[in-house]
Protein backbone atom coordinates (compact mmCIF):
# COMPACT_ATOMS: atom_id res chain seq x y z
CA UNK A 1 0.00 0.00 0.00
CA UNK A 2 1.03 3.60 -0.62
CA UNK A 3 -0.11 6.92 0.80
CA UNK A 4 -0.05 9.07 -2.33
CA UNK A 5 2.62 11.38 -0.88
CA UNK A 6 5.37 11.46 -3.51
CA UNK A 7 8.71 11.22 -1.72
CA UNK A 8 11.13 12.03 -4.53
CA UNK A 9 11.73 12.43 -8.25
CA UNK A 10 13.84 9.66 -9.80
CA UNK A 11 15.40 9.45 -13.26
CA UNK A 12 15.10 6.60 -15.74
CA UNK A 13 18.77 5.72 -16.13
CA UNK A 14 18.48 2.66 -18.35
CA UNK A 15 15.81 0.69 -20.23
CA UNK A 16 16.26 -2.85 -21.52
CA UNK A 17 13.66 -4.14 -23.98
CA UNK A 18 12.71 -7.82 -23.96
CA UNK A 19 9.80 -9.63 -25.61
CA UNK A 20 6.75 -8.70 -23.53
CA UNK A 21 8.90 -7.09 -20.84
CA UNK A 22 10.70 -3.83 -20.13
CA UNK A 23 13.37 -3.51 -17.48
CA UNK A 24 13.97 -0.10 -15.89
CA UNK A 25 16.94 1.09 -13.90
CA UNK A 26 16.03 4.14 -11.80
CA UNK A 27 18.47 6.59 -10.24
CA UNK A 28 17.13 7.92 -6.93
CA UNK A 29 18.11 10.99 -4.91
CA UNK A 30 20.58 10.17 -2.10
CA UNK A 31 18.94 8.43 0.85
CA UNK A 32 15.72 7.40 -0.87
CA UNK A 33 16.82 3.77 -1.21
CA UNK A 34 18.15 3.30 2.32
CA UNK A 35 17.19 -0.24 3.36
CA UNK A 36 15.48 -0.91 0.02
CA UNK A 37 15.70 -4.66 -0.58
CA UNK A 38 15.10 -6.88 -3.57
CA UNK A 39 11.40 -7.76 -3.57
CA UNK A 40 10.33 -4.44 -2.06
CA UNK A 41 7.61 -2.34 -3.68
CA UNK A 42 8.04 1.16 -5.09
CA UNK A 43 5.33 3.24 -6.75
CA UNK A 44 6.73 4.68 -9.99
CA UNK A 45 4.40 7.35 -11.38
CA UNK A 46 1.69 5.59 -9.39
CA UNK A 47 2.45 2.08 -10.68
CA UNK A 48 3.45 -0.48 -8.06
CA UNK A 49 6.70 -2.14 -9.16
CA UNK A 50 8.91 -4.76 -7.50
CA UNK A 51 12.64 -4.27 -7.03
CA UNK A 52 14.47 -6.99 -8.97
CA UNK A 53 18.10 -5.83 -8.53
CA UNK A 54 20.22 -3.30 -6.65
CA UNK A 55 23.17 -2.68 -9.02
CA UNK A 56 24.58 0.28 -7.07
CA UNK A 57 23.81 2.83 -4.39
CA UNK A 58 20.84 5.09 -5.20
CA UNK A 59 19.77 2.72 -7.96
CA UNK A 60 17.29 -0.11 -8.41
CA UNK A 61 15.95 -2.16 -11.27
CA UNK A 62 12.35 -3.15 -12.03
CA UNK A 63 10.71 -5.45 -14.58
CA UNK A 64 7.42 -4.25 -16.09
CA UNK A 65 5.20 -6.77 -17.89
CA UNK A 66 3.30 -6.07 -21.08
CA UNK A 67 -0.08 -5.51 -19.41
CA UNK A 68 1.33 -2.78 -17.17
CA UNK A 69 3.12 -1.20 -20.14
CA UNK A 70 -0.14 -0.98 -22.09
CA UNK A 71 -2.23 0.33 -19.17
CA UNK A 72 0.23 2.96 -17.90
CA UNK A 73 2.60 5.63 -19.14
CA UNK A 74 5.60 3.38 -18.43
CA UNK A 75 5.36 2.02 -21.96
CA UNK A 76 6.29 5.46 -23.30
CA UNK A 77 8.99 6.40 -20.76
CA UNK A 78 12.47 7.00 -22.14
CA UNK A 79 15.95 7.09 -20.65
CA UNK A 80 16.44 10.38 -18.82
CA UNK A 81 12.75 10.89 -18.03
CA UNK A 82 11.81 11.99 -14.49
CA UNK A 83 9.25 9.94 -12.55
CA UNK A 84 7.48 10.30 -9.20
CA UNK A 85 8.49 7.65 -6.66
CA UNK A 86 7.16 6.54 -3.27
CA UNK A 87 8.29 3.67 -1.05
CA UNK A 88 5.63 1.27 0.28
CA UNK A 89 3.94 2.48 3.46
CA UNK A 90 5.08 0.97 6.75
CA UNK A 91 2.81 -0.11 9.60
CA UNK A 92 1.87 2.91 11.68
CA UNK A 93 2.94 5.41 9.02
CA UNK A 94 0.97 8.64 8.77
CA UNK A 95 -1.43 8.62 5.82
CA UNK A 96 -0.90 12.14 4.54
CA UNK A 97 -2.85 11.49 1.35
CA UNK A 98 -5.20 8.52 0.95
CA UNK A 99 -4.59 4.76 0.68
CA UNK A 100 -3.42 3.69 -2.77
CA UNK A 101 -2.87 0.23 -4.21
CA UNK A 102 -0.49 1.28 -6.98
CA UNK A 103 -2.80 -0.33 -9.54
CA UNK A 104 -3.44 2.25 -12.26
CA UNK A 105 -7.01 2.24 -13.58
CA UNK A 106 -6.55 4.23 -16.77
CA UNK A 107 -4.48 6.83 -18.59
CA UNK A 108 -5.85 10.34 -18.98
CA UNK A 109 -4.72 13.29 -21.06
CA UNK A 110 -3.65 16.65 -19.67
CA UNK A 111 -6.14 18.95 -21.40
CA UNK A 112 -5.17 22.34 -19.98
CA UNK A 113 -2.92 24.24 -17.59
CA UNK A 114 -3.72 27.46 -15.75
CA UNK A 115 -1.30 29.37 -13.55
CA UNK A 116 -3.05 31.67 -11.04
CA UNK A 117 -0.66 33.38 -8.64
CA UNK A 118 1.14 30.78 -6.47
CA UNK A 119 -1.02 28.00 -7.92
CA UNK A 120 -0.89 25.56 -10.82
CA UNK A 121 -4.18 24.15 -12.13
CA UNK A 122 -4.35 21.02 -14.25
CA UNK A 123 -7.44 20.06 -16.24
CA UNK A 124 -7.45 16.34 -16.99
CA UNK A 125 -9.66 14.61 -19.56
CA UNK A 126 -11.18 11.29 -18.51
CA UNK A 127 -12.41 8.56 -20.88
CA UNK A 128 -15.72 6.75 -20.43
CA UNK A 129 -16.84 5.27 -18.06
CA UNK A 130 -14.41 6.42 -15.37
CA UNK A 131 -15.96 9.83 -14.62
CA UNK A 132 -18.71 8.08 -12.64
CA UNK A 133 -16.15 7.63 -9.85
CA UNK A 134 -14.80 11.19 -9.78
CA UNK A 135 -16.48 13.95 -7.76
CA UNK A 136 -15.64 17.44 -6.63
CA UNK A 137 -13.83 17.42 -3.24
CA UNK A 138 -13.13 13.70 -3.64
CA UNK A 139 -9.72 12.05 -3.75
CA UNK A 140 -7.86 11.05 -6.91
CA UNK A 141 -4.34 9.76 -7.53
CA UNK A 142 -2.48 11.19 -10.54
CA UNK A 143 0.97 9.78 -11.31
CA UNK A 144 1.04 8.46 -7.76
CA UNK A 145 0.19 11.76 -6.06
CA UNK A 146 -2.88 11.96 -3.84
CA UNK A 147 -4.83 15.04 -4.92
CA UNK A 148 -8.20 16.61 -4.15
CA UNK A 149 -10.58 17.15 -7.06
CA UNK A 150 -11.51 20.84 -7.24
CA UNK A 151 -14.11 20.53 -9.99
CA UNK A 152 -15.52 17.63 -11.99
CA UNK A 153 -17.78 17.65 -15.06
CA UNK A 154 -19.38 14.52 -16.51
CA UNK A 155 -20.71 14.14 -20.04
CA UNK A 156 -23.66 11.92 -20.90
CA UNK A 157 -21.39 9.40 -22.66
CA UNK A 158 -19.51 8.71 -19.39
CA UNK A 159 -16.45 10.78 -20.22
CA UNK A 160 -15.59 14.18 -18.73
CA UNK A 161 -12.86 16.16 -17.03
CA UNK A 162 -11.68 17.25 -13.61
CA UNK A 163 -9.31 19.86 -12.25
CA UNK A 164 -6.73 19.77 -9.48
CA UNK A 165 -4.93 22.76 -7.93
CA UNK A 166 -1.27 22.33 -7.04
CA UNK A 167 0.67 24.44 -4.56
CA UNK A 168 4.39 25.28 -5.07
CA UNK A 169 5.49 22.50 -2.68
CA UNK A 170 3.65 19.88 -4.75
CA UNK A 171 5.31 21.18 -7.91
CA UNK A 172 8.73 21.03 -6.23
CA UNK A 173 8.27 17.46 -5.00
CA UNK A 174 6.74 15.99 -8.18
CA UNK A 175 7.09 16.01 -11.96
CA UNK A 176 3.87 17.98 -12.55
CA UNK A 177 5.72 21.24 -13.20
CA UNK A 178 7.27 19.78 -16.34
CA UNK A 179 4.07 18.34 -17.79
CA UNK A 180 2.62 19.85 -20.96
CA UNK A 181 -0.83 19.82 -22.55
CA UNK A 182 -1.37 16.49 -24.30
CA UNK A 183 0.82 14.49 -21.92
CA UNK A 184 -0.58 11.19 -20.67
CA UNK A 185 -1.06 10.68 -16.92
CA UNK A 186 -1.68 7.59 -14.77
CA UNK A 187 -4.89 7.73 -12.73
CA UNK A 188 -6.00 5.53 -9.84
CA UNK A 189 -9.51 6.19 -8.57
CA UNK A 190 -10.43 6.17 -4.88
CA UNK A 191 -11.56 2.63 -4.05
CA UNK A 192 -14.25 3.34 -1.46
CA UNK A 193 -15.96 5.72 -3.90
CA UNK A 194 -15.83 3.05 -6.60
CA UNK A 195 -17.39 0.46 -4.28
CA UNK A 196 -20.15 2.89 -3.25
CA UNK A 197 -21.02 3.88 -6.83
CA UNK A 198 -20.95 0.30 -8.16
CA UNK A 199 -23.09 -0.94 -5.25
CA UNK A 200 -25.75 1.73 -5.81
CA UNK A 201 -25.79 1.12 -9.57
CA UNK A 202 -26.16 -2.63 -9.03
CA UNK A 203 -29.01 -2.07 -6.55
CA UNK A 204 -30.81 0.24 -8.98
CA UNK A 205 -30.43 -2.29 -11.80
CA UNK A 206 -31.62 -5.19 -9.62
CA UNK A 207 -34.66 -3.40 -8.21
CA UNK A 208 -35.87 -1.61 -11.33
CA UNK A 209 -35.17 -4.31 -13.91
CA UNK A 210 -37.44 -3.65 -16.92
CA UNK A 211 -38.19 -0.11 -15.71
CA UNK A 212 -34.52 0.89 -15.99
CA UNK A 213 -34.73 2.13 -19.63
CA UNK A 214 -37.70 4.34 -18.69
CA UNK A 215 -35.74 5.83 -15.76
CA UNK A 216 -32.73 6.46 -17.98
CA UNK A 217 -34.95 8.20 -20.54
CA UNK A 218 -36.56 10.37 -17.85
CA UNK A 219 -33.18 11.33 -16.41
CA UNK A 220 -31.83 12.10 -19.88
CA UNK A 221 -34.65 14.64 -20.41
CA UNK A 222 -33.42 16.34 -17.22
CA UNK A 223 -29.82 16.27 -18.40
CA UNK A 224 -28.90 13.63 -15.81
CA UNK A 225 -27.71 10.00 -15.79
CA UNK A 226 -27.83 7.01 -13.44
CA UNK A 227 -24.40 8.03 -12.22
CA UNK A 228 -26.00 11.14 -10.68
CA UNK A 229 -28.22 8.87 -8.56
CA UNK A 230 -25.17 6.93 -7.41
CA UNK A 231 -23.29 10.06 -6.34
CA UNK A 232 -22.23 9.81 -2.68
CA UNK A 233 -23.89 12.36 -0.45
CA UNK A 234 -20.62 12.90 1.42
CA UNK A 235 -17.30 11.74 0.08
CA UNK A 236 -14.47 10.52 2.31
CA UNK A 237 -12.40 13.50 3.44
CA UNK A 238 -14.86 16.10 2.14
Image: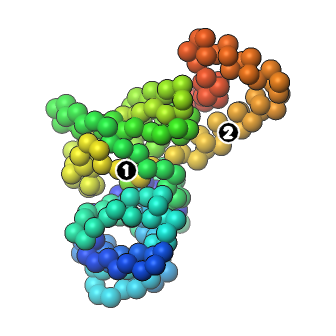
Depicted 78 relative to depicted 104: above or below: below
Q: Name the residue under label 2.
A: 198
How many angstroms separate mark 1 from mark 2 (CA)? Answer: 24 Å
Mark number for residue 65? none
- Secondary structure under the numbered disc 1 in the rendered image: strand
Depicted 39 relative to depicted 175: above or below: below
Any part of residue 136 in sight: no
Q: Name the residue under label 1.
A: 185
Residue 124 picture location, percent across and down:
37, 39
User: What residue is shown at x 21% (from left), y 51% (from top)?
Assistant: 178
Any part of residue 21 in sight: yes
Residue 204 picture location, percent across and down:
76, 28
User: What residue is shown at x 32% (from left), y 64% (from top)?
Assistant: 77
> Is 70 on the left-hand or right-hand side of 170?
right
User: What residue is shown at x 49% (from left), y 69% (from top)?
Assistant: 66
- Secondary structure under the numbered disc 2 in the rendered image: helix
> Is 102 on the left-hand or right-hand side of 27?
right
The residue closer to the viewer here, 129 or 179, is: 129
Amino acid sequence: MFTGIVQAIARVERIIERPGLRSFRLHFPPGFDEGLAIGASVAVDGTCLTVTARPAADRAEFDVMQQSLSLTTLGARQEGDPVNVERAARDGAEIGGHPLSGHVDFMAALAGIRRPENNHVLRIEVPSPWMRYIFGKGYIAVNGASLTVAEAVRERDGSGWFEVWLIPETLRQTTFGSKEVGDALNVEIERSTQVFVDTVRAAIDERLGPLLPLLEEMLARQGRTLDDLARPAALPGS
